[in-house]
Image (cartoon, grey):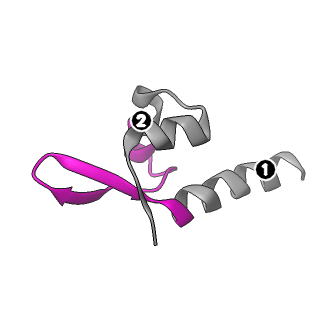
């Protein structure tokens, strides 16, 4: 299991930082995992699943 930092999530998804956090608030994006202190990350497989879901929605 790999944990991605925010810049990696932004690079993979093409979303802006503010959009990532807006989608989290709307519960339409995987939530971050606390890494201690003020550090957070995202589970890579959850981000990949979110991207795959967007592709599947497009192809309907």
Q: Secondary structure at mark 1?
A: helix
Q: Residue at x 55, y 55 (%)?
A: 47
Residue found 59% across the figure and 42% down from its top: 12
Given contact means CB atoms under 8 Å apart, are the residues at marks 1 and 2 in contact? no
The range drawn in magenta is 21-45
| Residue 30 seen from this side | yes
Which residue corresponds to the image point at 81% horizontal and 56% vertical from the top-left? 56
In the rendered image, the vertical position of residue 8 relative to residue 3, given as above or below: above
Q: Earlier in the sequence, mark 1 or mark 2?
A: 2
Q: Is residue 4 highlighted in magenta?
A: no
Label 2 residue SS: helix
Q: Given the current orientation, which residue lies at the most extreme right position?
A: 60
Which label belongs to residue 10? none
Instruction: Assess whether residue 42 is covered by the magenta stretch.
Output: yes
Q: Height in image: 30 above or below 7?
A: below
Look at the image and tell me whether residue 31 can be seen: no
- The image quarter containing residue 52 is bottom right
Q: In the picture, residue 11 is in which quadrant? A: top right
The residue where tag 1 is placed is 55
Q: Is residue 42 left or right of residue 28?
A: left
Near-viewer residue (15 or 11): 11
Residue 2 point in image, percent of width and height: 45, 65
Local packing at callout 2 (Cα closer than 10 Å; few below 14, some 14-19, many 20+) is: few
Q: CA distance from mark 1 to mark 2?
A: 20 Å
Residue lying furthest left in this view? 37
Eye-nearest disc, 1 or 2: 1
Q: Position of residue 31 (x, y in %)?
A: 38, 56
Q: Would you name the residue on which mark 2 appears?
A: 22
């Amino acid at each position: 299991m790999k944990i991605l930092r925010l810049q990696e999530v932004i690079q993979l998804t093409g979303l802006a930082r503010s959009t990532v956090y807006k989608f989290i608030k709307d519960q339409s994006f995987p939530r971050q995992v606390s890494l201690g202190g003020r550090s957070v990350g995202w589970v890579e497989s959850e981000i990949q699943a979110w991207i795959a879901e967007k592709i599947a929605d497009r192809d309907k």
